[in-house]
Image (tube, coloured by chain):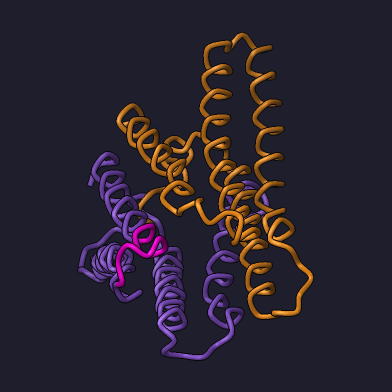
Chain colours: A purple, B orange
């Protein structure tokens, strides 16, 4: 997929999600929170599917691991981050729908784990010489 | 994931360090929101909860100003002005959204006319700008 296609994909899903969120928060629609998060579910499912296909592609015979694509460990981290984000959104929806009586702190734990991981990844990119040491 | 870090930096127009700063601010902000929501007797006001986001915006503005001055001194005048204009536009839209949301949460009774469509409108403008920029970067 080209950059424009990926941007368009992200843009459309973000726009639809924001519109649905605003309608719900302003009380214009009485939809279920799980339905409001539908663009998030679809977008995340596409991402997880794409990641899974790319990871499975490495298992093909004759695959060259030095062809410039990110290594398996990085892809595994991306997959974990996606699952953590999905876990956060699911528990948040369950809390908003009053299906589960959990504290917001517990709901946020997957989000914090994902953000910490992203911070470490970004930090390693800011200081690349420390990564090699 | 969907975008490489290089693509993100090109598209959003922010340096890696600025992205790090905003992500860190988001982490602290989410912790404060959880703290405020779970402790009903907490004396933490909504304005205090939003401090990490405001601080990140301020630091990002400072960082961009320094980078733009350096670029200007190195005779990259066009790049310096364009970068400064873009980052200031994005940060202003983000700040307006944050201030409106904070006001809505802090003064629920007085801010009854402030509907969420209005609060999120800077983000809608930002999305259009990001789409235009993506076409240019591509």
In this orientation, which residue lies closer to the viewer: B33 or B40? B40
Residue stretch rendered in magenta on the structure: A21-30
Q: Position of residue A44 (x, y in %)?
A: 32, 66
In this orientation, which residue lies closer to the viewer: A32 or B80? A32
Quadrant showing the C terminus of chain A: bottom right
Query: Eyeballing the image, is B122 above or below A20?
Result: above
Q: Is residue A19 left or right of residue A87?
A: left
Query: Eyeballing the image, is B1 above or below A100?
Result: above
User: At x 53% / y 70%, what residue is drawn?
Assistant: A111
* Residue A22 covered by magenta stretch: yes
Q: Position of residue A46 (x, y in %)?
A: 25, 64
In this orientation, which residue lies closer to the viewer: B44 or A15? B44
Asked whether the viewer can see residue A124, the reply is no
Q: Quadrant of residue A80?
A: bottom left
* Residue A28 covered by magenta stretch: yes
Q: Quadrant of residue A119?
A: bottom right
Q: Position of residue A74 (x, y in %)?
A: 45, 63
Residue extending furthest left? A61
Query: Eyeballing the image, is B109 above or below B6?
Result: below
Asked whether the viewer can see residue A49, the reply is yes
User: At x 25% / y 70%, what residue is drawn?
Assistant: A56
In this orientation, which residue lies closer to the viewer: A48 or B106? B106
User: At x 61% / y 49%, what residue is drawn?
Assistant: B22
Q: Is residue B69 left or right of residue A39?
A: right
User: At x 34% / y 53%, what residue is drawn?
Assistant: A14
Query: Eyeballing the image, is B116 above or below B40?
Result: above
Q: Position of residue A94 (x, y in %)?
A: 41, 83
């Amino acid at each position: 997929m080209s950059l424009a296609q990926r941007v368009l994909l992200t843009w459309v899903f973000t726009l639809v999600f924001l519109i649905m969120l605003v309608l719900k928060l302003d009380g214009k629609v009485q939809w279920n929170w799980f339905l409001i998060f539908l663009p998030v579910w679809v977008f995340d499912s596409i991402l997880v599917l794409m990641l899974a296909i790319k990871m499975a592609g490495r298992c093909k015979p004759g695959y060259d691991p030095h062809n410039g694509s990110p290594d398996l460990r990085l892809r595994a981290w991306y997959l974990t981050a996606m699952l953590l984000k999905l876990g956060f959104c699911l528990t948040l929806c369950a809390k908003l729908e009053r299906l589960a009586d959990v504290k917001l702190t517990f709901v946020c734990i997957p989000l914090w784990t994902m953000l910490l991981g992203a911070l470490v990844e970004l930090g390693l990119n800011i200081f690349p010489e420390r990564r090699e040491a | 994931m969907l975008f490489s870090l290089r693509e993100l930096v090109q598209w959003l127009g922010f340096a890696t360090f600025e992205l790090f700063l905003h992500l860190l601010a988001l982490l602290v902000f989410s912790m404060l929101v959880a703290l405020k929501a779970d402790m009903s007797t907490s004396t933490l006001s909504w304005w205090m909860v939003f401090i990490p986001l405001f601080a990140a915006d301020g630091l990002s503005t400072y960082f961009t100003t320094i980078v733009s001055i350096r670029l200007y001194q190195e005779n990259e005048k066009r790049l310096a002005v364009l970068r400064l204009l873009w980052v200031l536009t994005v940060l202003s839209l983000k700040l307006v959204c944050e201030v409106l949301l904070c006001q809505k949460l802090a003064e629920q009774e007085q801010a009854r006319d402030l509907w969420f469509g209005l609060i999120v409108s800077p983000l809608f403008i930002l999305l259009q700008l990001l789409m235009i920029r993506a076409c240019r970067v591509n």
